[in-house]
Image: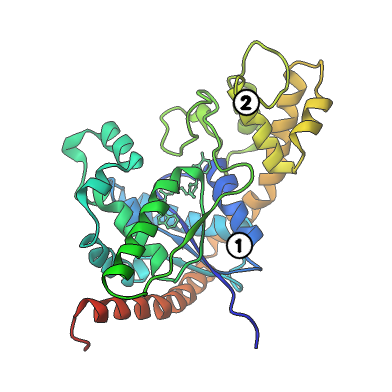
Amino acid sequence: MEDKKKVIFSGIQPSGNLTIGNYYGAIKNWVKLQDEYDCFYCVVDMHAITVRQEPKDLRRRTLEVLSLYVAAGVDPDKNTLFIQSHVPAHAEIAWLLNCYTYIGELSRMTQFKDKSARYGDASVSAGLFDYPALMAGDILLYNTDLVPVGIDQKQHIELTRDLAERFNNIYSPTLTIPEIYLGETGAKVMDLQEPTKKMSKSSDNPNSYILMMDPAEVIRKKISRSVTDSIGVVKYSDEQPGIKNLMTLLNCATGMSFEAMEKKYEGQGYAQFKIDVAEALIADLEPIQKRARELVEDKEQLEAIYRKGADKASAVANKTVRKMMKKIGFIPR
Ligand code: TYM
């Protein structure tokens, strides 16, 4: 009998246009892992509403994100691709896990602290606070072994592990304890203007990020304007966070090693290096952009993908919720 494949779950919020941080930190690894694992890749629209969304933008972005998954090479025939709100078990497990999550734990989450500082207390919803319980639920529903994400999600994955262990200890082994998967490079793509900060799709300054759908001339402009330093040497060093980030991007786009880059650009300053980074990103992204533009117009194909995905996901997810409910002491229907 064939060995059962290990399970992967990951997701992206349709709360903005995806950046190359989302691509190199998450999606590109999903593509790499899809043959070896049984993968569930989700558009987490329920997470997106933890901050206010314009309904028509949310609808459009949800389908754009799904199109980008497929366009980037996540094969809908091999993987389960779906939209979170289509599988009600996500809402159910979030409630269950809520009751095993402490306020203290949620208060320590840095993403919550950052976002609540940005939006101000008056508009911080209970959903934003509780978001990690929903995320833990996403992962635990599928008996997930591995979660490929960027490093900013590490704290949420650790909480997920704690919640699963807590549940298993109170009752009996029920939930699989997942592990984080971080790519060798690209797990933290930095802001092009402030390279000590993470690149984010919610930044107010468009020069600070590159979108997966940015046209070539925009990419060239943003890279040429990216903040570097006055040292003038292409070297992978913490003292040169801007250059380190551009080297990371070049590595993510081409696979070229940092040593090879240091050698190639020795004594040349930054001009040619920046041009090459921009061209490498363009070459990596253009085929994806072309496929994504076609796919997002093909509503029928997208519908077929997310419907089939929701059916497959529901079958697994419902089983986990039923198992948990039984252990908790709910009467089976
Ligand atoms: P989100 O939507 O903010 O980001 C999606 C994925 O992109 C990664 N990422 C980055 N990686 C490297 N460098 C960056 N600058 C960068 N910016 C974003 C994120 O780490 C993430 O992998 N809570 C999650 C969504 C989520 C989820 C889940 C993920 C909900 N449920 C279950 C995994 C499993 C989030 O807000 O990601």
Q: Which residue is mark 1?
A: 74
Marks 2 and 1, the one that precedes in the sequence:
1
Residue 176 occupies quadrant:
bottom left
Identify which residue, 228 or 60, lies in the foreground: 228
Q: Which residue is mark 2?
A: 221
> Which residue is at a point 30% across and 80% down the rendered structure image?
322
Neighbour tally class for label 2: few under 14, some 14-19, many 20 plus, Cα within 10 Å: few
Q: Secondary structure at mark 1?
A: loop
Determine whether 112 is above or below 79 in the image. Answer: above
Query: Residue 312 location in percent, x, y?
Result: 46, 78
Q: Secondary structure at mark 2?
A: helix
In the shown orientation, is residue 268 left or right of residue 225?
A: right
Residue 168 occupies quadrant:
bottom left
Identify which residue, 254 or 97, lies in the foreground: 97
> Which residue is at a point 22% across and 33% down the rendered structure image?
120
In the shown orientation, is residue 202 left or right of residue 242?
A: left
Determine whether 72 is above or below 231 in the image. Answer: below
In the shown orientation, is residue 307 left or right of residue 72?
A: left
The label shown at residue 327 is none
Ligand 1 has an atom within 8 Å of the beta carbon of the residue at disc 1: no
Kindly identify the amino acid type of the residue bearing the numbered disc 2: Lys
Kindly identify the amino acid type of the residue bearing the numbered disc 1: Val
The reply to whether residue 304 is visible in this rendering is: yes
| Front tag of 2 and 1 | 1
Query: Residue 124 location in percent, x, y?
Result: 21, 41
Query: Residue 73 location in percent, x, y?
Result: 64, 60
The quadrant of the image that shows the N terminus is bottom right
Q: In the rendered picture of this protein, how many numbered marks are placed on residues?
A: 2
In the shown orientation, is residue 319 left or right of residue 254?
A: left
Residue lying furthest front in this view? 169
Identify which residue, 316 or 80, lies in the foreground: 316
Query: Residue 295 location in percent, x, y?
Result: 58, 60
